[in-house]
Amino acid sequence: MNRRRVLDTGALRHWPLPTIDAGCDKESRGRVVLIAGSREIPGAALLAAQAALRAGAGKVLVATGESVAMHVAVAMPELRVVGLPETSLGGLDPSGLSQLDTALRRASAVLVGPGMQDEAAAIDLTQALRQRHPELPTILDAAAMGGATREPVAGHPVLLTPHAGEMAHLTGHDKGAVLDDAESAAREAARWWNAVVALKGATTVIADPLGETWVHENANPGLATAGSGDVLAGLMVGFAARGAPLLQAAAWGVAVHARAGDRLGAVGFLASELLAQVPALIGSLAPLDRGRFTPVEQTPSAAQAAPVRRSAG
């Protein structure tokens, strides 16, 4: 049965993120593995990685092309960076996935896709990842989304983040039809792919395979800028690493991302400028990040149940 809800401030306050204890360490805040970037778009990995840390994740490992790995590491000293072999088209060679097995076994969540080139290689890498680590909370963005939609893998749902054009590409439907009925498009895709789907736009629709649907309205054209989607995907994986289920990670990512844009105005800000807005916004939406790290109101529900946390190792 379809359940439609509006994702507004009241909904977020009654659906707080998992608590971060005042005495926590970086291991207990969650580890992110981020597979992203390419020779032409290394900045996508940086935007997503910083967003994950701003969202509260404790540690982030970035796996990117070996030709740009050192540049990414120097640009952001908070990261651990692994260089992977590249294809002739500038993508990440799926053979390099074995280099990440230890990190993936210890990870709390993984994000694949921002800034990746060579769609065929991205799909092969994603499918190999899902086969090797089907239990790992996984967010797929951009070119990596085809790895979940072409041959869905049994196991836990993944989170996909298409805009209307990407949804049309993935489903073979007309983009206009997707825009005309975004809610139906998102629900149908979520059921078919066994995935949480965040169909992005001025009206963003988030649906899970069981029919639960959240709708978020925000028509800020400033968010339609290069790198904005990388920031959004990074927020989602950061929230997932903290222990939020994928549906909640998607909802909070969409809401915080939109509100960060609203704080900066309309057209003219950069995607990187969204990042500094995130910590205060999280605190304003739910007081779990203010000193005691304890929500004022915590209403238990099935939607709040966090996935089993893996060993920090």
Image (cartoon, grey):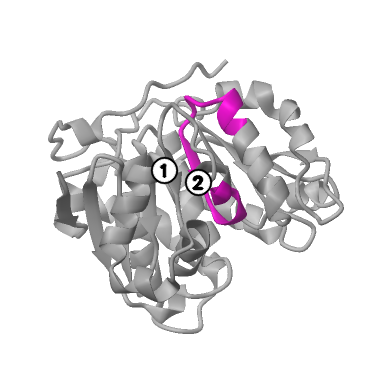
Q: Which residue is mark 1?
A: 193
Q: Which residue is mark 2?
A: 149
The amino acid marked with disc number 1 is: Trp
Q: Residue furthest bottom?
A: 267
Residue segment shown in magenta: 129-146
Q: CA distance from mark 1 to mark 2?
A: 6 Å
Viewed as shown, does residue 261 lie left or right of 33? Answer: left
Determine the residue positioned at 80% across, 58% down: 39
Where's the N terminus, which quadrant? Answer: top left
Looking at the picture, how far across and down is residue 23, in whole percent?
Answer: 38, 25
Viewed as shown, does residue 194 lie left or right of 117? Answer: left
Determine the residue positioned at 67% across, 39% down: 125
Viewed as shown, does residue 58 lie left or right of 252? Answer: right
| In the depicted structure, whether residue 195 falls above or below residue 30 | below
- Residue 128 can be seen, yes or no: yes
Determine the residue positioned at 21% across, 57% down: 7
- Residue 263 can be seen, yes or no: no
The amino acid marked with disc number 2 is: Thr
Earlier in the chain: of badge 1 and badge 2, it is 2
| In the depicted structure, whether residue 264 falls above or below residue 93 | below
| SS for callout 2 | helix
